Amino acid sequence: MKLLTSVAPIGLALLLTGCPLTDHYRLLEDDPAGLDQGGGSGTVGGAGETGGEPNLAASGAGSGGETASCTVGCNAPRRCVANRCESGWVPMAPPPLALVARSKAASVAVGNAVFIWGGLDNNGAALGNGAIYHPTTDKWTPLPMDTGSPTPRIMATAVWTGDASNKVIVYGGTDAAGGMVFKDGAVYDITNNMWMSLPPNPSPSKRSAPFGYWDGTRAVFFGGLNAMSSTVAGADRFDLKSWSSSTSNGDPGLLGFPAIAFDGTVMYLQGGVIAGIRQDKAYAYTSSTDTWASLSKSLSVRTGAFGAWDGARFVVWGGQDDDGLRDDGKTMSGQTWAEMSTSGVLSARRIGFRRSGWAFQVKPGVIAMLGGQTSISGSSGTLATDGATYAVDSAEWTAIPSWSSLETHEYGIGVWTGEEFVIWGGRDQNVSTLTGERWAP
């Protein structure tokens, strides 16, 4: 392995390279021209919403176009044909006026809807508002702004606690200039439509854009970056009452830009970079027992690979090594790695850290990968607008065409709801957009 080029940190103003180079998080990472990574208060149904639903629970299917022969309900504006909802890309309705164009917002799926909060507007100001988007009706519900709301910020992380408690935890991020990294946030109670401030986190770590997930009992915020554009070790954990930190025993340390996946219980990591050197190691973290485990190695060193859990296996594909972008990958079951097919494979690319690139399980045994960066140049013109699905058992790649607008959605939100992939906002030609689109398999 060779040492990666070290780049002096620049202000945490706008995350990652765009064009011109005004963004932050140019880590001592992959290349001097760009970055990568490997790896979601209005009324919910109340007055003031934009044609929204009475509540999230009432946002069921059936509001899209249907034919008399269909017995399934389809998300608007999809039609039902031969008892099947139309697949492919459809445009999203524009948001309410209060939800201005933005990039670097926090987002997460809440059931079959999408929670969006904060971000950076076109004037360079951090935002402190948001909305919930409902694919079932193609309508938006503004979020309230009250005394418990988080302060305006960019690059925060949102985690949904599931149906039982039905809350969204917004944590971390930075101010608009990037000089202040936060270790606070707030909890949005969907059922009662109100915000509550998080209790103080005693951890010394501050995290911008950590990887976040709900393990069934607690929210886990792993990694992320600090104000010096350096990786933050370990994880902070919140159980809706108090904070705790993950153990350092077996922790991979200051690992940046690995492929990441979560199976509902365990977080998996592969590759990444430590102290400027790309890695080939793999790890598993179980937050319920607060234990780290080293897994078998098989893939070559890489950063910024796509990672996903297919229901039974950890899938790692693409990324960047010391020679350039990769178009290969492997799947891991237990401690055994298996090659992925290279027939009909997606073009070589990597995930750009919170910039472009999403991977998720479409159904058991099938994952999808969309977007990403197709060049190491770092320019916004190298962001992909297409993708592919991969069926692990049949080793078959199936192309996903570019989304309809062809806007790059740079630093936009990308969320899989379990039914559709929603991509909205971000920047196109360095200007934030209100455009959104949805893909269904």
Image (cartoon, helix red, strand yellow):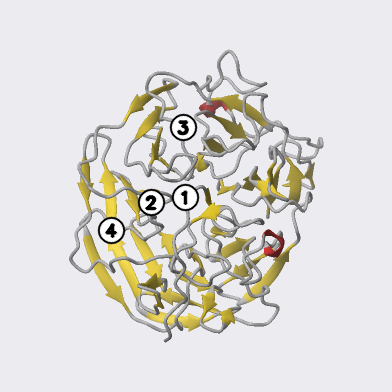
Q: For the residues marked 4 and 1, what is the alpha-carbon distance in whole angstroms? A: 21 Å
Q: In this view, does 179 lie above or below 321?
A: above
Write down the residue under mark 4.
234
Question: Relative to residue 31, is residue 150 drawn left or right?
Answer: left
Q: Is residue 270 above or below residue 363?
A: below
Which of the two labelled residues, at mark 4 and mark 1, occupies the earlier sequence position? Answer: 1
SS for dot 3: loop
Q: Which of marks 4 and 1 is in front?
A: 1
Which of the two labelled residues, at mark 3 and mark 4, occupies the earlier sequence position? Answer: 3
Quadrant in the picture for residue 222:
bottom left
Q: Is 241 in front, or is 185?
A: 185
Q: Is residue 169 above or below residue 278?
A: above
Is residue 309 visible to the viewer in this orientation of the structure? no
User: Which residue is pictured at 36% across the width and 31% down the height?
Assistant: 186
Q: For the residues marked 3 and 2, what is the alpha-carbon distance in whole angstroms? A: 17 Å
Write down the residue under mark 2.
227
* Mark 1 nearby-residue class (10 Å; few <14, some 14–19, many ≥20): many
Question: Relative to residue 94, is residue 349 drawn left or right?
Answer: left
Q: Is 413 in front, or is 361?
A: 413
Q: For the residues marked 1 and 2, what is the alpha-carbon distance in whole angstroms? A: 7 Å
User: Which residue is pictured at 51% across the width and 59% down the height?
Assistant: 353
Question: Relative to residue 135, is residue 131 drawn left or right?
Answer: left
